[in-house]
């Protein structure tokens, strides 16, 4: 037993305090605004060009409930709220993509414009079926 290890009586090392890195805010000069205008709600999302969400707002999260969510005014308020949330990213201009045929479609675009953003293009990306599955029968009242 010549190679026996002898325990040492050294004090254990103190744990180092965690150093927090400063979070660097990204600046995104050009972004994409996606407007989903449904029948009952309007959702406005601002993303960078890769599709990463920077800020979002909806008629419901802006404080409207029930049938007031599906009004053009609530869509305008939601668009103005999302611009104030995304102001820290330094967005100057946006490309707007509109999906859906809800009542807040046009007013959401006006809300983005009225909040001080430059609109490069307005693109309609509403899904239109061509062929596909058979539609359900028409409702009889």
Image: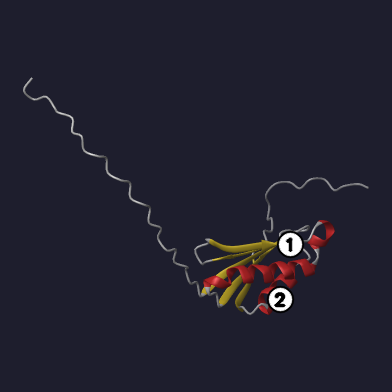
Seen from this angle, which residue lies furthest top? 1
Neighbor class of circle 2 (other Cα within 10 Å; few <14, some 14-19, many 20+) is: some
Residue drawn where x is 20% and y is 34% of the image: 9
Measured as percent of width and height from the top left, residue 5 is found at: 14, 27
- The quadrant in which residue 100 appears is bottom right
**Labels 1 and 2 touching (C-beta < 8 A):** no
State the CA–CA distance, disc 1 to disc 2.
15 Å
Residue drawn where x is 51% and y is 67% of the image: 49
Residue 109 left/right relative to 20: right
SS label for mark 2: helix
Could one spot residue 84 in this view of the protein?
yes
Residue drawn where x is 79% and y is 68% of the image: 72
User: Which one is in front, 5 or 139?
Assistant: 5
Residue 63 left/right relative to 25: right
Instruction: Say if 6 sits above or below 93 in the image.
Output: above
Seen from this angle, which residue lies furthest right? 141
Tag of residue 27: none
Could one spot residue 105 in this view of the protein?
no
Tag of residue 110: 2
Seen from this angle, which residue lies furthest left? 2
Residue 72 left/right relative to 11: right
Instruction: Say if 31 sits above or below 42 in the image.
Output: below
Q: How many marks?
A: 2
User: Which one is in front, 37 or 84?
Assistant: 84
Tag of residue 59: 1
Q: Nearer the viewer, mark 1 or mark 2?
A: 1
- The quadrant in which residue 56 appears is bottom right
Measured as percent of width and height from the top left, residue 127 is found at: 67, 59
Residue drawn where x is 33% and y is 50% of the image: 16
User: Which one is in front, 20 or 129?
Assistant: 20
Measured as percent of width and height from the top left, residue 74 is found at: 77, 66
Instruction: Say if 110 sits above or below 38 in the image.
Output: below
């Amino acid at each position: 037993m010549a190679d026996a290890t002898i325990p040492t009586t050294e004090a254990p090392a103190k744990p180092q305090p965690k150093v927090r890195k400063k979070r660097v805010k990204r600046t995104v000069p050009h972004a994409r605004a996606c407007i989903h205008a449904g029948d009952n709600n309007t959702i406005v999302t601002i993303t960078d060009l890769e599709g990463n969400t920077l800020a979002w707002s909806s008629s419901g999260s802006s404080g409207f409930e029930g049938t007031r969510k599906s009004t053009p005014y609530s869509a305008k308020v939601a668009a103005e709220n999302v611009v104030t949330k995304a102001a820290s990213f330094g967005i100057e201009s946006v490309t707007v993509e509109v999906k859906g045929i809800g009542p807040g479609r046009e007013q959401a675009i006006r809300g983005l414009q009225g909040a001080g953003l430059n609109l490069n293009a307005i693109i309609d990306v509403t899904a239109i079926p061509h062929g596909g599955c058979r539609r359900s029968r028409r409702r009889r009242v």
